[in-house]
Amino acid sequence: MVNITQKSSSLRIAIATAVVKVSRPETIAAIQQRKIPKGDVFEFARAAGLLGVKKTSDLIPDCHPLPIEYTSISYEIEGLNIIISVEVHTIYKTGVEVEAMHGASITALTMYDMLKPIDKAVEIQQIRLVKKTGGKSDLKNTAFPELKAAVVVCSDSIFEGNAADTSGRTLIALLEQFGIETQTYEVLPDEISAIREKALQLCSAEHQLLIFTGGTGLSPRDVTPEAIGPLIERPIEGIMETARRYGQERMPYAMLSRGVAGFIGSTLVLTFPGSKSGVEESFQALFPQVLHLFKINKGQKH
């Protein structure tokens, strides 16, 4: 199966439809009057469709087992067509479009099986996904070219030339995925005064986003939170809470990160861990949804 461990759980919704076409009005009348010999077509098919949604991962090898939080199966009759609609909700790391389509398929097959004794020309048509929401796929084509970033690496060893920077370079590449240009890239020692001075310098109209990487742990030289925390005018605790929760689900020491986040003036400042994996996990946890803050900060609701 595809690796989804890097994804975050979110509300995901899918709606699929299928069409069962009968050959004569008498079949529709028999369904509505519950005169089909095998039983109530709508209720039997609905029960089968619910089971179909739940059993999707048992029958389709590459589908992940996931919690089904809600399923609705409804019908609409248009002429000789019975339109089946299946809506499925989950809060998970991957979507439920296959589950919705599988449920529509099983519902339609059950109707076909129950109707074929009285209508030999019944057909199943147009099984398709009509709606899918949730997860980062809603934002996958989103770009933010209007945002300009600054990336600052806080590390004594990198500043002194004793180690190579991977976290800052990784962060720059990740930002490029959303069309965000890093206009400034700096490496600083783990010194409160140097970090604070650089933050004040970079929090200007030129940079809407400022990300520090490194110095958020608990070693004696990890001072990035002490440097940045007092400068933040509008703290946003939920940002780093989200990043820590995401990291904690993947490794046991993420709870020790002391990163802070918030606005200094109109610049959003984030403080990420210093490791390449820590940067990648923090970015996965927060982007691109965190960029919605720029609309809110300008007084826009959406």
Image (cartoon, rainbow, N blue to C red):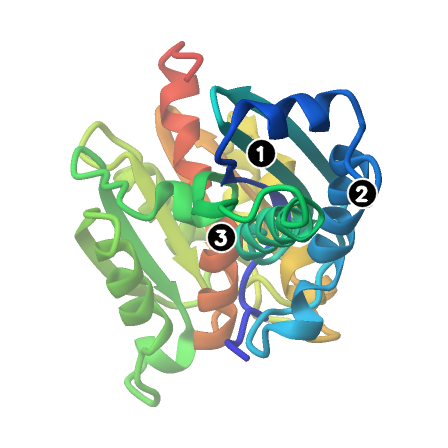
Query: How many circles with numbers are drawn on the protein?
Result: 3
Q: Nearer the viewer, residue 180 or 256?
A: 180
Q: Which numbered disc, 2 or 3, marks the residue closer to the eye?
A: 2
Residue 274 in percent (x, y) is at 48, 70
Which label's residue is closer to the chain start, 2 or 3? 2
Amino acid carrying mark 1 in the image = Ser
Tell me whether circle 2 and circle 3 mark residues in contact (CB < 8 Å). no
User: Is residue 163 in view?
Assistant: yes
Give the number of the disc on residue 44: 2
Number of other residues with Cα within 10 Å of mark 1, as a class: few under 14, some 14 to 19, many 20 or more: many
Give whichever of 85, 79 is nearer the camera: 79
Quarter of the image containing the C terminus? top left
Q: In terms of depth relative to the viewer, which is nearer, 106 or 225?
A: 106
> What residue is rendered at 58% in x and 34% in y?
85
Query: Residue 172 occupies which quadrant of the picture?
Result: bottom left
Q: Nearer the viewer, residue 148 or 74?
A: 74
Position in image of residue 130 (x %, y %): 43, 37
Q: Secondary structure at mark 1?
A: strand
Amino acid type indicated by mark 2: Phe
Q: What amino acid type should be assigned to the residue bearing mark 3?
A: Thr
Locate residue 209: give its quadrant. Answer: top left
Left or right of 43? Residue 209 is left
For label 2, the crowd category at 10 Å Cα-Cα, with few meaning under 14, some 14 to 19 and many 20 or more, is: some
Q: Nearer the viewer, mark 2 or mark 1?
A: 2
Sequence order check, earlier mark of 2 and 1: 2
The residue under label 1 is 85
* Residue wearing tag 3: 271
* Residues at discs 2 and 1 in contact (Cβ within 8 Å): no
